[in-house]
Amino acid sequence: MVLKTALKPRWIAGLLFALLVSTVFVLLSQWQFGRSTENEKAPDTSLETPKPLSEVLKPGSFFPSTASDQMVTLKGHYDPARQVLIKDRLLQGGSGFWVVTAFAVDGAPKLAGTKSTATTWIPVARGWVADPGKAPRAPEGEIALTGRLVASEAPTVTHQVPEQTYANLSVAELINVWDVSSYQGFVGASQELQNGQNVGAQDNGDLRALNLKAVPDENGVNWLNIFYAVEWVVFAGFALFIWWRLVKDDYQRQLEDAEDAAVFAQANDERASGEQQETTMNHRSKE
C-alpha cells in the first residue's frame, strides 16, 4: 500500500520538510496579500493647519492634488440669493442635504475674460440639514471662514431633482447657475465667525456641522502583489504534491520490483522443471 510506503522514515522526514517549505510559502503569500491591501496612507497632518486660501489655490486655475483637503481661512460675505442644496448626503447614518452658498472672497484676484465678474466667488458647504425646508438663509455681512478645501465633484448627470437641488456639488455647474467667476473647488465650512460670534452650523440646530475629514490616499489594489500571493499558494501545494509524487513513485517501483522478482522466480521454476524433465527422459532412453 502507498500508505505503508509513506510511513517509511525517509518519507516521514520528507513530509516534514515539505510541510516546512509549504508553511514558508503560505506565510509569504499572506505577506503579499497584506501588501496588496496596504492602499491607504494616513492623511498628511499638515493639512489640519489652516492656511490662507490665496496661498493654496488660485482662482480659475487647475485644482492641484496638494490642495485637496487642506484647511483654509478666508474672509468675505455670502450671497443668500445664491444658495442650493446637494441631495443624498449622509451624516451620522442619516440622509439629508448639504446647504451650499456662494461666498465672495475678499482680496481674491479678478479673473480675466469678458464674462468674468468683478468679484471672485467660491461655493461653501455651510452644513447639513435633514429637511430641505429648514435650510437656513446664509448670514449677511463680513464673515471670517475656516473650512476644508475640496475638489469639485462631477457635474450632475440628471436634473430630475427639485428646484435648486443638485445631485453633485459641481463648481462648473454652479458657475453657470450663479453666473459668477469662481475657484475650481469648494470649502466645507468648519467655523463661521461674524464679529467674533459663531454664526455657522450648530450640532443642536437644524443646520448641523459637516466635520469633513481629510481622505486617506488610496492607491487601489495592487494586483501584482495578489498575483505573487496566489503564486506562493500554488508553490505550497506543489511542495506537498512533489512529496506525494515521490512516495507514489517509490511505491510503484516496489510493485515493479515485486513483479520482476515473481517473473524471474517463475522463469527459474520453469527452467528447473524443464531440466528435470530432460534428465528423466535421458535416463529412460539409456535404460
Image (cartoon, grey):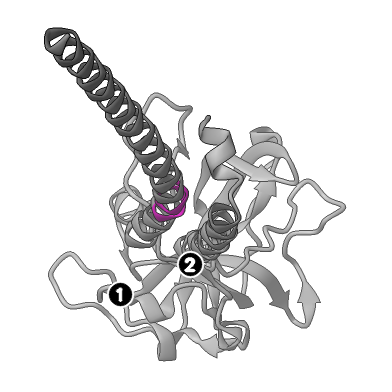
Check the image and report above or below for 270 versus 142: above
Total numbered circles = 2
Looking at the image, residue 26 sits to the left or right of residue 234; the answer is right
- Give the residue pinned by disc 2: 35
Q: Residues within 10 Å of mark 1 (few under 14, many from 20)?
A: few
Question: In the image, what residue type sits under mark 1?
Answer: Ala
Check the image and report above or below for 108 versus 115: below
Q: Nearer the viewer, residue 142 or 187?
A: 187
The magenta-colored residue range is 235-240
Residue at image x 71%, y 76%?
Answer: 193
Q: Is residue 136 visible?
A: no
Question: In the image, what residue type sits under mark 2?
Answer: Arg
Looking at the image, residue 152 sits to the left or right of residue 95; the answer is left
Residue at image x 52%, y 43%?
Answer: 86
Residue at image x 87%, y 52%?
Answer: 204
Nearest-to-viewer mark from 1 and 2: 2
Judging from the image, what secondary structure is the residue with disc 1 in?
loop
Please give the label number shown on residue 118.
1
Residue at image x 38%, y 32%?
Answer: 258
